[in-house]
Amino acid sequence: LSKVSGDSKQSYIWSLYYRGVIYSLAKKYKSAVKFFNTILTFEEAKEDDIDSLTFLALGRLYYEVKKFAPSAYYYGLVSRESDYWYDSMFEVSWAAFMSGDQAFSLGNIQSVEAPFFLDHENPEVFIVKAFNYLTLCQYKKLSDLIKEFKKTYDPVQEALSFLRAQYITKEQYGSFIL
């Protein structure tokens, strides 16, 4: 990737993005941030939504190192027109929860559950809401949420159990997970 030249700006910008991701995975965060920040200096980063992917990557990177305020900041920079807006809104809910801002977290969860996002199936939304309700001592809401989760996902679990039993033994399943 280091041999990609700036002659083709889009290729070069993508190479910077992938280098940032690779450094993030290697836990070399300072180098990753350098590559991601370099991307944001290019006006062409707005093409192909690379800027939004970069903001998501920075949000995830800062979340991983438990710097939740910068994480939320970068998630917030993802454009509403981006294909990644839903992801950023959902992920910032975790960052807000972890930083103790339950109101912001629940507000974003309410947004990702809006009819506009009906095509996004995300069972983890229940988990974020549950942690928020537990933290806020909203036990009735938590109990109702658990009932709603079971009503929604017990049939899914049953269907998956049927498939698992049909194609894989319990022993194979356990070794697969471990």
Image (tube, rainbow, N blue to C red):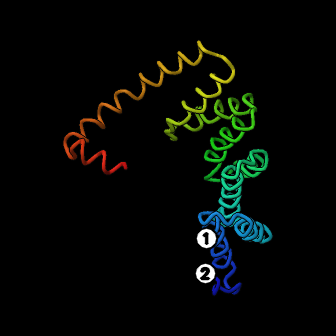
- The relative height of residue 13 versus residue 151 in the rendered view (above or below) is below
Residue depicted at x 65% and y 59%: 53
Left or right: 55 in relation to 175: right
Q: Which mark is residue 86?
A: none
Q: Would you name the residue on which mark 1 appears?
A: 18
Q: Secondary structure at mark 2?
A: loop
Q: Amino acid at mark 2?
A: Leu
Report x, y in % for residue 116.
60, 37
Looking at the rendering, which quadrant does residue 48 occupy? Answer: bottom right
Identify residue for label 2: 1
Marks 2/1: CA–CA distance: 8 Å
User: Image quarter for residue 34?
Assistant: bottom right
**Residue closest to the eye, 155 or 178:** 178
- Nearer the N terminus, badge 2 or badge 1? 2
Q: Marks 1 and 2: in contact by CB < 8 Å?
A: yes
Mark 2: few, some, or many residues within 10 Å (few <14, many ≥20)?
few
Question: Which residue appears at 31% of the width and 45% of the height?
Answer: 174
Disc 1 on helix, strand or loop?
helix
Q: Nearer the viewer, residue 91 or 68?
A: 68
Residue type highlighted by circle 1? Tyr
* Residue 39, position as x, y percentages in the image: 74, 69
